[in-house]
Image: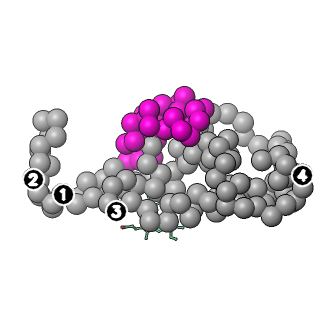
Amino acid sequence: MSCFLILQTPITYDALMKMDCLEMAINESMRLLPTAPRLERVCKKTVELNGVTIPKDTLVGIPTYVLCPFCALPQFFSLHPECKSEMNQYAFMPFGLGPRNCIGMRFAQMIMKLLVVKLLQNFSMETCKETQVGTFHQYIVH
Ligand code: HEM
């Protein structure tokens, strides 16, 4: 990525797709602060899951906000994107999952990468005295 920052070159789609570290950083942001903190599904027929009966027409809330920070494997986000298959896909679903997942996922991922690259090409960033440095868990405890 650094050559793009120095040369101020136009960014191509292929170049963005190769920015694995940037993708990991974006994933980590979405893991800690998911844009959609809760997904919902309506149960089409009565089912029993692990001893719990969910009647037909029940609105089931899926708390991704809770699942992401606490259940996802922290080491996943330090792995290369090719290793994603090792992770339980239900532990990290910033764009939902299944037939009604986000249709704009790939577009959104590309734009988020492009935005960060453009920001870094045009500005230099540094922390200030108000910058909070710490873990997500510290923030929610306070
Ligand atoms: C960071 C950006 C975005 C995030 C985090 C996000 C997240 C989500 C989530 C969590 C859902 C619900 C999925 C589910 O219930 O399983 C969703 C649905 C949807 N998203 Fe996104 N989204 C993003 C950007 C976009 C963009 C850019 C578009 C369109 C260009 C888009 C279009 C849609 C549509 C149409 C649905 C409804 C799909 C359906 O009900 O079948 N999203 N999105």
Percent from the top left, x then y, of residue 32? 55, 43
Compared to residue 55, the image places residue 129 above or below, namely: above
Mark 1: which amino acid?
Cys
Pointer 1 residue: 43
Question: Would the CB of label 3 be found within 8 Å of ligand 1?
Answer: yes
- In the picture of the structure, the residue carrying the numbered disc 3 is 100
Pointer 1 local density, CA inside 10 Å: few below 14, some 14–19, many at least 20: some
Question: Label 2: which residue?
Answer: 46
Residue 114 rendering spot, x and y as whole percentages = 70, 60
At horizontal 54% and vertical 28% (from top left) the residue drawn is: 75
* Tags 1 and 2 touching, CB below 8 Å: yes
The magenta stretch spans which residues?
63-91
Q: Nearer the viewer, mark 1 or mark 4?
A: 4
Q: Is residue 137 visible?
A: no
Camera-side residue of 52 and 7: 7
x%, y% of residue 56?
Answer: 11, 58
Residue 112 location (% of width, % of height): 64, 58
Q: Residue furthest top?
A: 75
Residues under labels 3 and 1: Cα distance?
A: 14 Å
Badge 2 marks a residue whose secondary structure is loop
Instruction: Give the prevailing secondary structure in the magenta stretch.
Output: helix
Queried on whether the Cβ of the residue with tag 2 lies below 8 angstroms from ligand 1, the answer reads no
Q: Which mark is residue 6?
A: 4
- Residue under the point 72% across and 61% down: 12
Residue type pointed to by label 3: Arg
